[in-house]
Each structure stands twice: as C-alpha cells, then as structure tokens.
Image (cartoon, rainbow, N blue to C red):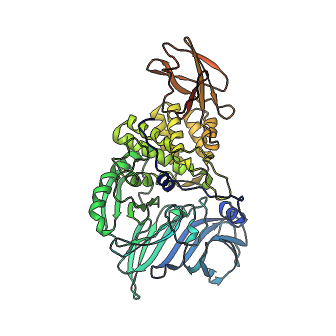
Amino acid sequence: MTRTRIVPAALLAALIVCPAAHAQGPTRADSLRGSIGPARAWWDVAYYDLNLAVSPADSSVRGSSGITYRVLQPATEMQIDLQRLEVDSIVQDGQSLRYRRDGNALFVTLAAPQAAGAVKTVTVHYHGRPIVARRAPWDGGFVWARDPGGQPWIATAVQGLGASAWWPNKDTQADEPDSMRIAVTVPRGITNVSNGRLRDSVHNADGTTTWEWFVRSPINNYGVAVNAGSYAHFSDVYEGEKGPLTLDYWPLAMHEQAARRQWGRDVKPMLQCFENWFGPFPWYEDGFKLVETPHLGMEHQSAVAYGNGYRNGYLGQDLSGTGRGMSWDYIIIHEAGHEWFGNHITTKDIADMWVHEGFTTYSEGLFVECQQGADAGAEYIIGQRRNIQNDAPIVGTYGVNAEGSGDMYFKGANLLHTIRQVVNDDAKWRGILRGLNSTFGRQTVTGAQVTEYISREAGIDLSRVFQQYLTTPRIPELEYRIQGNQLSYRWANVVPGFDMPVRVTLAPGEYGQIAPTTTWQTANVHGVTAANFRVDDNFYVTARNADGPRTKR
C-alpha cells in the first residue's frame, strides 16, 4: 500500500495496551485475579459505596469501600481484592472481621450466616500510597501531576492493572454492581469529576471539599475514576434516540476555549453516528461527560478521560496513514466508542478484550464513513493494517488475567470489516451491531457469545473465520493460478474447514464472489490474467499466484 507510511514504533507501543506477561507461566496471583474461585463464586455484587480522601501532599489515600452483595449460596469466606494498600478494618453488621492476605487478595472470614438470597454489606476501611502510574494509561495506577499553571492535577487509570490498585472491590470484569456512589474528598480549590451525575459538593472544616457522584447503571471496576483538577464546566444537550442526553464537559479552566471548539465539533456527530450503528447511547440516566486528564485517555464510563491536547488524529498523527484520520480527534471518537463496546458490553475475562478493542477500533472507520462516505471509511480501516504485527493470537489465556496480542485493535477491526463483506448486506450488518447492544448491553459476556450471535444473525457459519483470525496469527492466503479462461483457487495457511467467501476479479475491473475451501476449485474468468487478477482489498487476506512468486498485501 504505497500511500501509507510506517507508524513510529514508539507511537505504536504507546497506543497498544500490552498483554499481561507470564514469562514463567501464570502465578497464583494471576489465577486469583483472573478466575472466579470459591471465595468469589458465591456472591454477586449489587452496590459499591466508595468514600475516598485524596492527599496530593504525600500522594496518599484514605477511605472505605462498602460492598453490598447478594448471596447466591451459603459460604464463610469472601475474596476481596486490594493491591498494596493497608487495611484498617473490615466490618459487617458492626462487627470487625478476621482476614488473611494472599498477595493482592484478602480472604475474609464471615461471622454472620450468609443465607442464599440475602443481601449483605461488608465495608473495608483502608489507607496508603497507591501504585503510581509512570506511563498512564498503559501501566496503570494513580497519576499525581501538576497542570501548566502548577496546580494539582490527579487522575486514575487502571485498566489491566485493576481497580484494586486504589479501592477494595471484587476485581473481575465478570461482576458489576447495579449502581455505585463515589464520594471523593480533595483539597479545596480543585474539583473532582467522577462517573455518573454530581449529587452534592460539601466544603469541610479542614479545608477540603467532598464531591459526591452517583452512577445509576452497572459499571465495570476499571471504569470508575478520580479526576481532580482546576476544571471549568460547560454543558450542552444532544437530542438522541432516547430523548435529551446531557453533555457535560470538564476541561482545565485554562483550556476551556479550546475544549469548546474541539469537543463541540466532534461529540454530537460521534453520538449521531454511533447511535445509528450501535443503538442508543447506553447511559442516558448518567449522561455523557468528557474530562481532561494528565494522561492520554481512557473509556471511563460516563466520564470519558481526554488527554489528546486538542489535536486532530492520535497525538497529531493518523494511525491509518491515509489522511482520513486527521479531520477528527482520535481520543474523543475511540474512547467514547467504548461506551458501547467495553462499558455497555463488557467481557467476563480480559482474554476476550478483542470485543472491547476490536469493535471500538472498527467504530473509528464507521465514524469516517459517517463523515466522509463508505469508501473513505473502508480506506481508513484498510490503512490500519500496517500496524498489525501478527505476533500472537488475539485471544489470551482464560482464567489468569491475561490479554491476547495487541493486534486486538487493528486486526480486530479488520476482522469485523471483513465479516461485513461476507455478510454483504449493510442493513443486516447494522442490525447485528445494534442487536449486540440490545441483547448483551449491561451484561458481562464471553467472546463465544458474541461470535455465536454474529453467526446466528448473519445466517452464516462464521466459526472458522473467528477461529482463524482470533486464535491464530496466520492470515488466510488465497492460492490461485490462471490458465486461459479458468481460475483455480484454494485457501492456504488456514485452520481446517476454513471456507470464507471472498471477492476477486472474474473479469477486468469487475469483482465477483467465489467460495474457496482448502481444496482446489475452478471458476470461469474472461480477460483476467495473473497480472490483473485482484482480491478485493476489503477482505483482510493475502493472495499468491501458485505459479509465481509469493507476494505480500
């Protein structure tokens, strides 16, 4: 693809969240974090009540996390996760409970009977200095920064590392609360913006202010956020599919005018596009927010973190190399796209994080399509292939808190773009994307549920296609030869039974569909030679003339 250039390695590394490394194999800590063990399986989170005092003077926190849960079956031991921070006490029904620590997991011995069907609350009081993120949002933790005016600017970003890096919880994507209260106390003069809607702010006698936020919707743990700084606030309303949606913007006060221009330009077109393709914005009750942060960005639910410097593209560059990504702000579009895929639909295990990142990276191409047309959207997605490494499977190892390859972004997007071609019916494809959200929204799911739904709604068995692109690093190769008016073809470099249809030139300048398998088949062609034979670029495959040299696309 001569129009593209190679993405600088540092920039590409900055974009992709690296998979959890288990060089010596998964540890006990990995299993405790990544699996639903006996001390997790018996209870279902219903509500979190988080109270947190943040001290930028010594980079410390102190607070409590009230965990309300439904008892699914009787038990006497409960796993609560908390990394590095000190526990002051764990209390239920006014009684202090005994616990033992196993790495980042607290195993609490419950004194009161836990009867099936009961709703109970346990509260963990804690303090300490949370893990500091040195390169947020990729390494995770607390960010203790100063804004350009020298004022404290604080944020959390813990995807991958886990929310238990700064508050006690059931640190798995598989279990979300139905709602959550977040009360954050910070020095007076700075504002804390968290998820959901602001309920109250109280000036305390000790020179601090407590900002109380409430989330009325299910929320994943890593989406919960602290954002504290010298913020301005302005608002707007978007008339969406479900009625008026409040838009609240929290830039640094010194950047308010830049935010009014940049955010005001991109947010409403993004919402219009994504509501069309994916269904209604998921959190009308909690509203949409953008919050400026001292890190690049993160899909914090109803409080999307933004740190792209009010530049178009990704840090001023187009990751597709086509130029199509330079008329809009990457962080706004990508991170807001996660509200549908990642927040609304959340995978139970991070091994299936391709559902979050693949669909959201694909959403960028849909936004380009909404703004610039279908050909431009396809060009953008195809251009992203230059970033694919094909180094390891996209799906990670289940049960040990391990993501798959960073190819979950660009390869995941190109997988979906390819499947759109196979479905070959944009109305049906749009129905599938909207149906995913109406069927699995506000739930935690497996990757298998998603792939099976797409196959079922498409009316096509796509199981081998998903197996090929998600579980192997190999790209399907169409082997062909042309002899006179006969085209011979088959798939190579594929999983057994791979039979994805593909469009190729059956006449000069005209594409037609063939249905290759791993066995040689033939089709009639007219005026097609090895020199002008093409595979439609919209399919992420390679092609090789069996009678000529191997070529790379």
As rendered, which of 258 and 367 lies closer to the eye? 258
Number of marks in the image? 0
Let me know if residue 185 appears in the view.
Answer: yes
* Residue 135 place in picture, x, y as percent: 50, 64
View extreme (front): residue = 549
Residue ID at (46%, 75%): 183
* Residue 487 place in picture, x, y as percent: 57, 17
View extreme (top): residue = 484
* Residue 24 place in picture, x, y as percent: 71, 59
In the rendered image of this protein, does residue 359 appear above or below residue 69?
above
Relative to 463, 372 lies left or right: left
Let me know if residue 92 appears in the view.
Answer: no
View extreme (bottom): residue = 205
> Where on the picture, by quarter, is residue 283?
bottom left
Relative to 65, 302 lies left or right: left
As rendered, which of 429 and 353 lies closer to the eye? 353
In the rendered image of this protein, does residue 335 appear above or below residue 534?
below
* Residue 121 place in picture, x, y as percent: 60, 74
Q: Quadrant of the N terminus?
A: top left
Relative to 442, 464 lies left or right: right
Residue ID at (55%, 30%): 551
